[in-house]
Image (cartoon, rainbow, N blue to C red):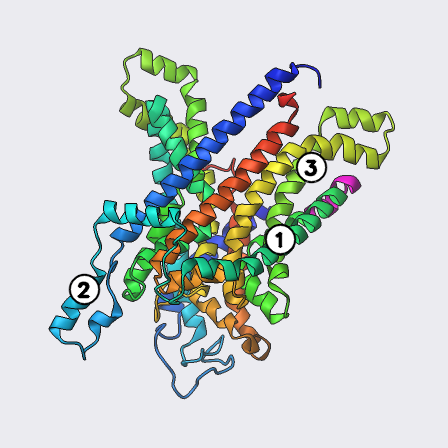
Amino acid sequence: MTGIPEHNRLGRLGRAVARRVSILLLLVITVTILSAVLVRLAPGFGMDESQLDLRLSNDSVASVRTELESPGTLLGLGNAVARLAHGDWGVSLALHQPVRELFLERSSLSLRTFCTGLFLAWTASFAAAVVLAWLRRPALDVCAALATGAWLCLPAAVIAVLCLYFQLVPGLALSAILIPRIFRYTRNILQAAASKPYVLAARARGVHEPSLMGRHICQPAAPELLALAGISISMAVSAMIPVEALCDSPGIGQLVWQSAAARDLPVLIYLTVLIAVVTCVANLVSDTASTLLSPEAW
Amino acid sequence: MNTTRVARWLLLSIMALMLGAGWWAPCPYDRQFRDQIAAPPSQTHLLGTDSVGRDRFSRLLYGGRISLFLVPAAATLSVGIALAIALGAALAGGWRESAATALIDLFLSMPWLFLLLAVRALLPLNAAPWLSVGTTFALLGLLGWPGPARVLLAAAHVQLDTAYVLRARASGCGPLRLAIIHIAPNLAPVAWAQFWTTAPAYLLAEVNLALLGLGIAEPLPSWGSLLRELQSLSSISHQPWILVPLGVLIVTLGCSQVAWKTGDYPT
């Protein structure tokens, strides 16, 4: 680790991080604008069921319509951004509750499910991949590939329903969805690292298997594993929706489903922005950590 | 006979069975036998009937026809859009390519199922059954292009650096001709591989959407809508035959994983 002078190295890393942060900001702004514009252009925007109420007179319907009249796409977008900047996230049309309140009361449960699922999935997948790389048995590899292939054929929603049938907690259901996906990538990364010539040379020189696994296989594969960790967060966010919706767990995933099913568009805008921020930040952190650990950076 | 061949034959047989649903199915998918509600398997109803008395076997065949023939259509749409964007961006270069890459990154940064749900919610939910079929598969096709586009853009760059492209350019070949006549045919194997990667993902996405109640509207069947029966948990133990559509789905997806690999582009 002496190839590049310290100040050059830090400068390069700083520039890379600054570039990624600017991309993140750009992405978040674009997502906000796009989702707000799409929502305003969606069929039925600004309509309310009360307009169909047969008891209302024409004057009352006209009055309801005036109340709901939208100020136009650009002005509406400006208003939405201004409200968001002041911490006002609007009110859910379906649940009649402030969106911010909905987020706050549901986020702790979602976070718990998310962390449990991700932790279990990573632990099981990484342990299985390490064991396979350690044992080097082709028959075991084939069995693992077949099992993973069959598991991947199960839709996430079906896995969630089956977990509910066996009365497993949502965190376990989430990990059951993520395990085959993370395991497949982890196995490929470790297999590629294990087939490098320096690993063969180290083995020929009699390096102990634990040391070989830790220092010569896992450590060089760390940047790729970290990049995978970033992607796995996006996978977990996706999997949270069927898990929480079908396991009746009142978290953010269930809110996404409820607002999609009820066309609760104000909630969907903020959920889109929130999820874009979460996944972009996760990718930013994993990319930066991956760059820091990669040999090219040094 | 090797595994790949067996998988191909099995997949083609399943597709043929679904295509001929009109001939093999014992009754129409929406016919309700009110005297045989939730009946067990019998000679007349091979997989029993559902909670409103419709023949489950017929619905499996008709549902397969919708799922198995619209999923490839959606995958073709995605790969077609991806190919057009990749070729356009690679040939244009400069800021246009940067803009295309940023757009790909933007779409890829959003979780797929969330994006699908959010955009599906923007469209009317109580649409007519056939309109809901079109909407669901068109959405899958229109939202699934970023992954293939990234791979195809990288492949297009490799092609742009080759000697035959240089020679074609030196001979005065225009960008459109270069893209359609020279580069696109050489990208076909990559596009083919992307097709086989996206099609199973769309089949799974349709099932997920249906289980969340945002898929194809009743009474039209799809494999996703058939699997909605799994949501009534008590019925799994009392009526294990409702798991048959799940088995067919797993076999189909498994065969599609094995049947065509990246290098198996038909020539």
Under mark 3, the amino acid is: Leu
For residue B267, say whether it is visible: no
Q: Are marks 2 and 3 on the same chain?
A: yes
Mark number for residue A259?
A: none
| Residue wearing tag 1 | A115
Residue found at x 57% / y 53%? A152
Q: CA distance from mark 1 to mark 2?
A: 45 Å
Q: Which one is in front, A255 or A86? A: A86
In front of the other: label 2 or label 3?
A: 2
Q: Are marks 3 and 1 on the same chain?
A: yes
**Reading the chain from its start, which is encountered first: label 1 or label 2?**
2
Residue found at x 34% / y 39%? B81
| Residue wearing tag 3 | A190
Q: Which one is in front, B49 or A92? A: A92
Task: Specify the segment rendered in magenta.
Answer: A133-142
For residue B140, say whether it is visible: yes
User: In what quadrant of the picture does the C terminus of chain A appear?
Assistant: top right
Q: Is residue B245 magenta?
A: no
Picture quadrant of residue A31: top left
Residue found at x 60% / y 63%? A170
**Reading the chain from its start, which is encountered first: label 2 or label 3?**
2
Q: Residues within 10 Å of mark 2 (few under 14, many from 20)?
A: some
Mark number for residue A65?
A: 2
**Reading the chain from its start, which is encountered first: label 3 or label 1?**
1
Majority secondary structure of magenta residues? helix
Under mark 2, the amino acid is: Arg
Residue extending farthest left = A58
